[in-house]
Amino acid sequence: MTATIDPALDILRPVSDGLRHLISRIDDAVTLGDSDAVTQRIKQELQAAIRARTVELPARFHEVRPAGYARRLLHRNDALGYTAVVMTWGPGQRTPLHDHAGIWCVEGVVEGRMDVTQFDLIEDQAGPEGGGYRFEEQGCVHAAVGSAGCLIPPFDYHVLANALDVPSITLHIYGGEMTTCHVFEPDGTGRYLRRDRALSYDD
Ligand SMILES: [Fe+2]
């Protein structure tokens, strides 16, 4: 079994045994196989670690990018097929409406507070009128530090937004490496147009 530990984690040794412990617990969780069981277990582990304040991130994960929220790789395990990504959100920063390209995800709030708005897809491009997608907003969750949520396709249409006027930080565990996703942009008629978005990591 091979695991790639981002060099940033080595900086943590020995102060963040808690983060290493969380990674080992996630290793165990992903072997459960079924995506419902995997994500529920990871959600529990993430919540427990954040609430115990053992998720100590190196300084670079705290840096806000003026151009948009930062997306930085924390850990990748190719053998087990998952990645851990930290996102850092400045005031007012948010995602567009998007999906996760068929990959399950568990997202936890490490610092600050996030607004998470879920959407149901109620009509796709092949609908009777064609020419776009329609969604129904399912409400907004105000996610405080220590809260976490699971996203399992096809129920993974959502918007994430920093709810504060100071930075917020989130930790995302993906069942793979998300290099692309779909974003949905309002076309002005109540429908959305879908386009592919390539995803990469910031420094
Ligand atoms: Fe997302």
Image: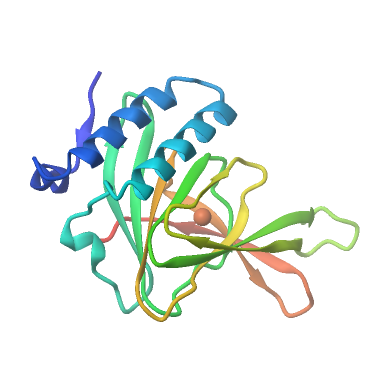
Find residue 182 and report its horizontal and vertical position in percent.
57, 56
Towards the viewer: 175 or 29: 29
> Can residue 124 be seen by looking at this rendering?
no
Residue 172 to residue 76: above or below: below
Q: Is residue 150 left or right of residue 84?
A: right
Towards the viewer: 39 or 94: 39
Q: Residue at x 42, y 26 (%)?
A: 29
Q: Name the colour scheme.
A: rainbow
**Figure quadrant of the C terminus:** bottom left
Give the residue at the far right of this rendering.
128
Numbered label tally: 0
Q: Residue at x 68, y 73 (%)?
A: 186
Residue 123 to residue 62: above or below: above
Find residue 162 and report its horizontal and vertical position in percent.
46, 71
**Figure quadrant of the N terminus:** top left
> Can residue 113 be seen by looking at this rendering?
yes
Find residue 190 and report its horizontal and vertical position in percent.
78, 74
Towards the viewer: 168 or 145: 145
Displayed quadrant of residue 112:
bottom left
Residue 190 to residue 11: above or below: below
Q: Residue at x 41, y 36 (%)?
A: 45
Displayed quadrant of residue 83:
top left
